[in-house]
């Protein structure tokens, strides 16, 4: 009886010592905002209004030192800079609603790159708006979002997972400089999704997955780019991340896009897009016809 009491007491003590994140009580629709530490008060006010952040929303600050902590191994210090500017609002969504990313004044990281990196980090089912008072790279935003998501959801993200998510963002952005940002993001997503379904046994299998997906997307990779991607994905497969969740987030995100395109609104958008391009083609034809 005495031993049982001691065991129960030990369990109760251990529970009280768990991180405060574990007791977070997040609900659908909750909003948290992450602000770059070096914003002026005027800029903060402007961004909060732009993001339509409710007055009771929790605020988290991200510093330039944190940027260097998570990105310093992957890009030059000069590229990270000395100020944290980019900011974001995160609104928790319904289960299996996927990620919905919107950016403004971000010139180095695309919506798709943020989506890929956040899915890797375990961020799920949220509407995220990323912005800055003027054009910036957007590196501070990812660090801030991961930090804010931990506070908001009560789910602690391991440090190695945070770093690999930041590395993925950089890897994709650098690849995008040579093959195009959209193709780079698509390649990273496709390779990661295939790995989530069938874990490769070694680097050769990873290389084959990369080359197959690159061919499907008509991407010509250099030997250096292939080696860099192989090393990154090999590192990714050796980190303890939730691959089932990654696959699920990719699936629900794809479904959202598919549902939109099949909806009345989506079809209307595609029709308008088609009419726009046809008007350009007709204008070009008319121009050349007038020359003869």
Image (tube, grey):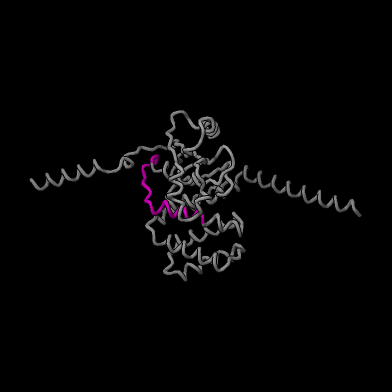
Q: Main secondary structure of the magenta part?
A: helix
Q: Which residue is outermost to the top?
A: 55
* Image location (x, y in percent) of residue 285: 83, 52
Q: Is residue 55 magenta?
A: no
Residue shown at 46% from the left, 52% from the top: 72
Q: Relative to residue 243, is residue 111 depicted above or below? A: above
In the displayed structure image, the side of residue 222 where residue 98 appears, left or right = left
Q: Which residue is outermost to the bottom?
A: 204
Region of the chain picked out in magenta, as a range: 151-170
In the displayed structure image, the side of residue 264 where residue 287 appears, left or right = right
86 and 179: which is toward the camera? 86
Residue shown at 55% from the left, 64% from the top: 213
* Image location (x, y in percent) of residue 232: 47, 61
Q: Relative to residue 82, is residue 73 depicted above or below? A: below
Q: Residue 180 lies in what quarter of the image?
A: bottom right
Count of labels in the image: 0
Q: Which residue is outermost to the right?
A: 292
* Image location (x, y in percent) of residue 18: 27, 43
Residue shown at 44% from the left, 36% from the top: 32
Q: Is residue 162 magenta?
A: yes
Q: Relative to residue 3, is residue 48 depicted above or below? A: above
Residue shown at 53% from the left, 30% from the top: 42
Quadrant containing the C terminus is: bottom right
* Image location (x, y in percent) of residue 223: 55, 69
């Amino acid at each position: 009886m005495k031993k049982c009491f001691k065991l129960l007491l030990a369990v109760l003590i251990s529970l009280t010592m768990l991180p405060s994140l574990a007791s977070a009580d997040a609900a659908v629709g909750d909003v948290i905002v992450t602000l770059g530490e070096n914003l002026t008060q005027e800029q903060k006010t402007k961004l909060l209004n732009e993001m339509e952040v409710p007055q009771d929303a929790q605020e988290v600050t991200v510093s330039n030192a944190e940027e260097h902590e998570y990105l310093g191994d992957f890009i030059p210090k000069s590229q990270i800079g000395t100020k944290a500017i980019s900011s974001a609002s995160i609104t928790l969504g319904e289960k299996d609603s996927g990620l919905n990313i919107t950016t403004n004044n971000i010139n180095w990281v695309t919506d798709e790159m943020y989506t890929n990196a956040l899915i890797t980090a375990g961020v799920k089912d949220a509407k995220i708006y990323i912005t800055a008072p003027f054009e910036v790279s957007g590196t501070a935003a990812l660090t801030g979002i991961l930090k804010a998501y931990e506070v908001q959801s009560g789910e602690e993200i391991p440090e190695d997972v945070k770093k690999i998510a930041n590395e993925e963002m950089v890897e994709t952005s650098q690849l995008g400089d040579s093959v195009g940002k959209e193709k780079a993001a698509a390649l990273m997503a496709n390779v990661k999704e295939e790995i989530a379904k069938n874990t490769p046994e070694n680097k050769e299998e990873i290389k084959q997955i990369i080359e197959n997906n690159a061919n499907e997307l008509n991407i010509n990779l250099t030997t250096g780019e292939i080696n860099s991607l192989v090393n990154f994905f090999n590192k990714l497969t050796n980190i303890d991340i939730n691959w089932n969740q990654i696959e699920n987030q990719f699936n629900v995100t794809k479904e959202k896009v598919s549902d939109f395109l099949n909806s009345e609104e989506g079809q209307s958008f595609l029709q308008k897009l088609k009419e726009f391009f046809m008007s350009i083609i007709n204008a070009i034809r008319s121009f050349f016809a007038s020359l003869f």
